[in-house]
Image (spheres, grey):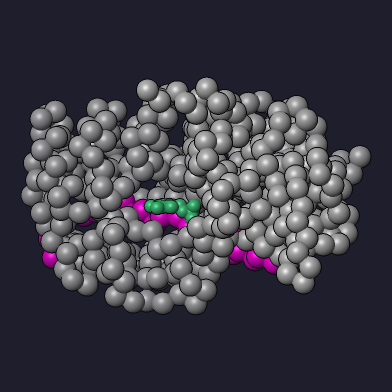
Amino acid sequence: MFVSDSLNVNAQGHLTVGGADAVTLAQEYGTPLYVMDEMGIRENCRQFKASIDRYYGRGLVCYASKAFCCKEMYRIIKSEGLGIDVVSGGELYTAQGVAFPADRIVFHGNNKTRQELEMALDYGVTRIVVDNLDELAALNQLAGERGVKAGIMFRIKPGIDAHTHSFIQTGQIDSKFGLALETGEAMEAVREAIKLQHIELVGLHCHIGSQIFDIAPFELAAQVMIDFLYRIQSELGYTVKELNLGGGFGVKYLSTDEPAPYDAYMERVSAVVRSQCARLGMAEPFVLIEPGRAIAAPTGVTLYTVGNRKDIPGVRSYLAIDGGMGDNPRYALYQSAYEIVAAAHPLGEKTQQVTVAGKCCESGDLIGEGMALQPVQPGDIVAVLATGAYNYSMSSNYNRIPRPAVVMVRDGQARIAVERESYEDVVRNDR
Ligand SMILES: *Cc1c(COP(=O)(O)O)cnc(C)c1O
């Protein structure tokens, strides 16, 4: 019926999110409002966990926090037994706030500051993903000062570009992330790391892109990475125990989107890892995966109140809502497509096509163009679907608009996960 199982319709015909009436939520908490379905998040966590257990056996699912991060999300992820990937001191600080286990944290980033590296070491993070040789040297020094060994993974560029629909295997050395295989840079880094006294190389990592619908590029990446593990073992006599295959699993933003089932992904990628290891006579590595949007996106919607309308004959109709690029910059950034429904009659016929505009002082402040929608009046509530990832986490105070609240719904009961910002919050750091 909708793009996500978190959504349904109740007896009044209203949209529900996690069993709660969207119209009532908007009345109670105001708009714009982010609404997340807790059981949807848990269900997605369980599916990934079950599929890695079933098809591979030895692995850890780490939720990529950047998709949606707040303490309540971390409490849920922690209680599901998943790990997290963090990319900044801010995300790590949030994780520390819920006592997230350090041995289930993977710390990414191409330019972590010394202060962030120190924070990770002091918290005891066991997997710091080192991006380059400068970082390796800094980390070795900081770990030495603390008398500890830093557990690291190297971020590798496997040379697979899966950003397009038909993926390509290219040199793809032009990326700010990671170490290239074909230039010898990656091998050089490994050689260096295993000599360092305060570094323990535990794994290799790759992440080939996002919103990938095909399984084949993931299979190819796994194969390239296993080959590299083997070369390290045969050339340097060193066994790298873990392989982190990253995230990027496609999600259903539109009814027409058909992402591969996550079970199928795990089944095929596990088969590649196992058969390659068998062929090379190598022990199978512990495998990590890092789904971000696949866990969060389908479980969230954003509720807005309809405002002014502008019909430009022969051109288009603008429908303005009380949020915009401040709470969802994804259309402005990369023309991401979403579906929108009238919260009071989401199954009604979509009789119009509108350009949904925000209230920011920017012509590009759009949620979407040519969006099909039921008839609505000013004051009605509309829901933009599958906004659970990269919306709240990418929000800003552009135009000094306070960020919306996030409510978490469980079995129809809502609770605040993140308070709505006030004007006072907006000026808090002003002198
Ligand atoms: C962004 C990112 C992810 C998650 O990507 P999704 O498309 O949200 O699954 C995982 N790992 C790394 C290293 C990333 O940068």
- Up the image or down, 119 lies above or below 226; here it is above
Report which quarter residue 102 is drawn in: top left
Residue 340 in percent (x, y) is at 73, 53
Q: Is residue 40 above or below residue 187?
A: above
Residue at the image point whose x is 75% and y is 32% from the top = 25
* Residue lying at 14% horizontally and 42% vertically, measured from the top left: 138
Percent from the top left, x then y, of residue 397?
50, 38
Q: Which residues are magenta?
A: 235-260
Q: Residue at x 41, y 55 (%)?
A: 246
Q: Is residue 243 left or right of residue 216?
A: left
Q: Quadrant of the C terminus?
A: top left
Q: Is residue 178 magenta?
A: no
Is residue 242 a member of the stretch shown in magenta? Answer: yes
Q: Nearer the viewer, residue 93 or 404?
A: 404
Residue 238, visible in the rendered structure:
no
Q: Quadrant of residue 323?
A: top right
